[in-house]
Image: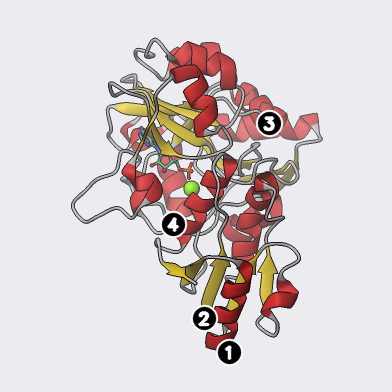
Amino acid sequence: MTLALSADRPEDIRKAGEILRGGGLVAIPTETVYGLAAAVFDPAAVARVFAAKGRPADNPLIVHVAEIVDIPKVCAQAPPIAPALAKRFWPGPLTLVMPRRDNVPDGVTAGLPTVAVRCPANDAARAVIRAAGVPLAAPSANRAGFPSPTTAAHVWNDMDGRVDAILDGGPCRWGVESTILDLTGPVPRLLRPGGVTRAQLEAVLGTVEVDPAVTGPVTEGHSPRAPGMKYRHYAPHAPIYLLHGPLNAAATYVKALARPGTAVLCFNGEQERFRPVPCVPYGDGDSPESLARGLFEALRKLDAPEIRCIYARCPEGDGLYEAVRNRLSRAAGFAVIEV
Ligand code: AMP
Ligand code: MG
């Protein structure tokens, strides 16, 4: 049985901490997406996270700490730039990949010599970490391969009966997962774009390399620095094709090809243009924040048995648009149609 907890009730935060200390799993809100948390130093609890999600064992988890000063609990030797980055962007949607400490179970890091760490900006998330008394290993609280959950209802849909409790903290502020930055190489490398943008990182670091897995498919035999990037992800059952080009051309193209089961993931206000093809709008085309917040819920709506082919409007531009484009591109397996 999965217990329903509310982030508004202090006794529920305490209860979440108690469950985690006892080796249980609790889904918690963060400012990015909902996470599926386990006490980081408990290998059995960590193994249950993989089982509950159906997550491949070679895809490591992100460790969540309540304070910057907790970094040394899981990280052997923070690179010299880490404190400056943490000071500038924590608490917030930036995950740092650093050398791991030996006490971090292999399950958390998938056997890598590194560990991914972040301090979330959500008050309830940090309150639960404090109540648990240890850092929490927490991937997104969805079934593996599916869109990340941005509301407690999404978590219930995926995880009812598979986790001990779900803490409802309302919809997530960002709606896409954290930016991941690898600090273990000679030059900091962006492994996944998110709420902290490339330009913000460059302002602190000067140069940032972008991992090829961010913008293109992972080719056979190549193992990406963030193992998660090699899986199809964020995806409804039906194939997705990204439409590249102006709205007019996109609408003409889709209407010419539409069959029963065709649907469009569009920007707000565009439904009329694609008529009679059914549309799911995900946000304002000129607001990357709005697109990021709405993307995963829209992808969940499109994960319906009657939908067999999805065409998606995908934003151009940098900043948070990059994170939206990255998630959509992965959901589409980088299938792009020039219209
Ligand atoms: P999720 O929390 O579900 O967004 O998944 C965590 C993401 O962080 C996955 O893409 C992992 O591959 C990535 N990750 C976790 N630990 C590491 C690490 N030590 N090095 C590189 N990527 C990592
Ligand atoms: Mg995930």
* Picture quadrant where residue 310 is located: bottom right
Q: Is residue 161 above or below residue 186?
A: below
Foreground: 116 or 44?
A: 116
Look at the numbered disc 3 and say if its residue's Cβ is closer than 8 Å to ligand 1.
no
Crowd class of label 2 (few under 14; some 14 to 19; many from 20; radius 10 Å): some
- The amino acid pointed to by label 2 is Arg
Please give the name of the residue rendered at 54% of the width and 33% of the height, measured from the top-left corner.
197
Q: Is residue 263 above or below residue 213?
A: below
The disc placed on residue 330 is 4
Please give the name of the residue rendered at 35% of the width and 52% of the height, measured from the top-left corner.
216
Helix, strand or loop at mark 4: helix
Query: What residue is shown with label 3?
Result: 122
Query: What residue is shown with label 2?
Result: 308
Across and down, in percent, residue 23 comes to 51, 35
Helix, strand or loop at mark 3: loop
Crowd class of label 3 (few under 14; some 14 to 19; many from 20; radius 10 Å): some
Q: What is the spatial separation of the Cα atoms under label 2 and label 4, in whole angstroms?
A: 18 Å
Query: What residue is shown with label 1?
Result: 260
Please give the name of the residue rendered at 63% of the width and 53% of the height, measured from the top-left corner.
155
In the picture, the quarter occupied by the N terminus is bottom right
Q: Is residue 239 above or below residue 82?
A: below
Q: Earlier in the sequence, mark 1 or mark 3?
A: 3
Across and down, in percent, residue 198 comes to 49, 32
Look at the numbered disc 4 and say if its residue's Cβ is closer than 8 Å to ligand 1.
no
